[in-house]
Image: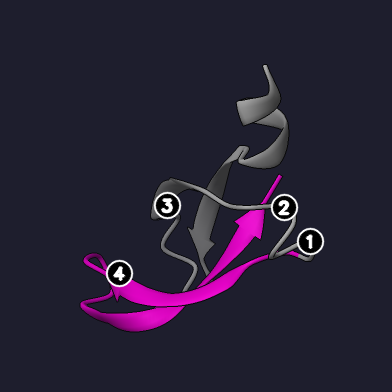
């Protein structure tokens, strides 16, 4: 049960407006704020920022 509390599953949603999402885990102790990663969006065919949604 402690594993889910420290490393929850999060969705990363594209800021390009395509609706594409990635699903990953994050460490709440290292990243307590919302995560923003630059990843590839295959619908937009370029790298864009993906923001954490809850």
Secondary structure found at label 4: strand
Residue 17 is tagged as none
Residue extending farthest top: 1
Q: Residue 40's x, y, as percent?
A: 28, 73
Q: Nearer the viewer, mark 4 or mark 2?
A: 2
Observer-nearest residue: 20 or 11? Answer: 11
Q: Which residues are magenta?
A: 34-54
Q: Residue at x 49, y 74 (%)?
A: 37
Secondary structure found at label 1: loop
- Residues marked 3 and 4 touching at CB (< 8 Å): no
Q: Nearer the viewer, mark 3 or mark 1?
A: 1
Tell me how far mark 4 sits from mark 2, CA to CA.
25 Å
Q: Residue at x 62, y 52 (%)?
A: 27
Q: Which residue is mark 3?
A: 21
Q: Which residue is mark 2?
A: 28
Dividing the picture into quadrants, the one containing residue 45 is bottom left
- Residues marked 2 and 1 touching at CB (< 8 Å): yes
Tell me how far mark 3 sits from mark 1, CA to CA.
20 Å
* Left or right: residue 21 compared with residue 12: left
Q: Which residue is mark 4?
A: 41
| First in sequence: mark 3 vs mark 1 | 3
Q: Residue at x 45, y 47 (%)?
A: 24
Tell me how far mark 2 sits from mark 3, CA to CA.
20 Å
Q: Nearer the viewer, mark 2 or mark 3?
A: 2
10 Å neighbourhood of mark 4: few (<14), some, or many (≥20)? Answer: many
Which quarter of the figure is the N terminus placed in?
top right
- Eyeballing the image, is 2 above or below 52? above
């Amino acid at each position: 049960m402690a594993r889910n509390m420290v490393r929850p599953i999060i969705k990363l949603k594209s800021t390009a407006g395509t609706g594409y999402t990635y699903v990953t885990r994050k460490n709440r102790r290292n990243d307590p704020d919302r995560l923003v990663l630059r990843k590839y969006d295959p619908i937009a065919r370029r790298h864009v920022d993906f923001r954490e949604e809850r």
